[in-house]
Amino acid sequence: MFAFIIGILAAIAAIVAFGLRRRAKSRLKRQGDTDDGHYDYGREPEVIGAGLITLIVGVLTAVVAVIALTASVVYTQDAGEAKVKVDVAGNITGQTTTTGFHTKFPWESTHTFNIRNQTVTYINAADGDTSDNNGGQRSGPYISVQASDGVTSTVSLSLRYSIRSETVTDVYREFRDEENFKKSFIEQDVRSVVRSVPTQYTTIELLTERDRVEDSILKALEDRWADDGVIVDSISLQEFVPPTEVSESYAAIQTETNKLEAAKVKAQQQVATAQGQADANAILNSQPLSDVSIQQRYIEALKTSGENGGLIVVPEGSTPLLNVGK
């Protein structure tokens, strides 16, 4: 449309320049005629200069019109984009999904959709901070969920999704632009699914089986968007926060569980030690007594006697002297 306006202005400028030139020439002819009725050609430069500026303006305007016309019928498309073409009456006339140069009619406009991976993030943040901690904008605060046992908690998460390029026409037809599609469709569905899935789990399961909960949310969204041209690339439950009393109770349970586990490990070690000693004794008892085994039993006997008191060990072959008091 802009090109047409410029073209019209260029045509008007050319007509005005031509008219001014003729008018100036006619006027100068009347003024420059000699007495014998002949035109004074010596004044021709003045006639030419009368419409020169207007003519230059008209030419420049025409050049701009050509450039604008070219720009209005040729457009480029980057990787990761899909464009929908719409005429002045609002009718969808086509779409393009490949990179490079494309053409359209001057009365058509293009609407661009991003078909790369995009993110929606729900986290709490400081007052006035809208960052998602990854260089983007968060979609909203924590989402409140309720487990099957009736406990209400909050969940923070990040979801990556993309739009199938062949469906952008349907997306435009229903939502008109990408921002509206994201706000009215993607974000609403994410909140709805994230609230519904946890009702299938207890609070303890939500705390301890995060991978299974993530898979359930992912599957629910894939089923929900199967016919809408949206691909779920990944989902990450970043934090699950139950009420304080639940967190404290869970921490206490974990502490006791850890103690029981430690005691179990210690008992297993003691059993293993006792079993090893029993096995060693069995081996000693099952074989003929050698000098080494006799010596070992002798040492063990000395240890036992020494613990009870009254035992004096002297070197072999010596004559001990005992001084017994009266």
Image (spheres, helix red, strand yellow):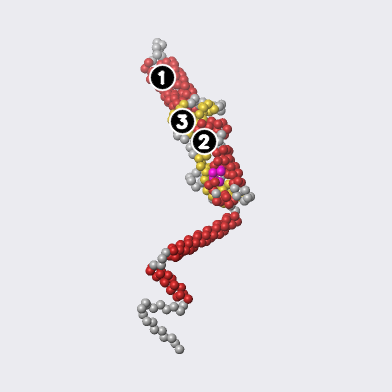
Circle 1 sits in a helix, a strand or a loop, which is it?
helix
Task: Check whether the beta carbons of the residues at disc 2 and disc 3 lie within 8 A of each other.
Answer: no
Looking at the image, which residue is at 47% across and 27% down?
72
What's the residue type where badge 3 is placed? Thr
Please name the residue that numbered disc 3 is placed on.
98
Q: Amino acid at mark 2?
A: Ile
- Packing grade of label 3 (10 A; few <14, some 14-19, many >=20) is some
Say which residue label 1 marks: 47
Q: Which residues are magenta?
A: 213-217
Of marks 2 and 1, which one's residue comes earlier in the chain? 1
- Mark 2 → mark 1, Cα distance in angstroms: 65 Å
Q: Depth-wise, is mark 2 or mark 1 nearer the camera?
A: 2
Q: Is residue 244 visible?
A: no
Of residues 71 and 56, which is closer to you in this image? 71
Q: Quadrant of residue 300?
A: bottom left
Q: Name the magenta segment's main secondary structure.
A: helix
**Per the image, is 214 magenta?**
yes
Distance from the alpha carbon under mark 3 to that under mark 1 = 56 Å
Q: Residues within 10 Å of mark 1 (few under 14, many from 20)?
A: many
For marks 2 and 3, the one nearer the N-term is 3
* Image disc number at residue 114: none
Q: Residue 125, relative to residue 269: is it above or below?
A: above
Above or below residue 299? Residue 171 is above
Locate the C terminus by quadrant: bottom left
Identify residue for label 2: 163
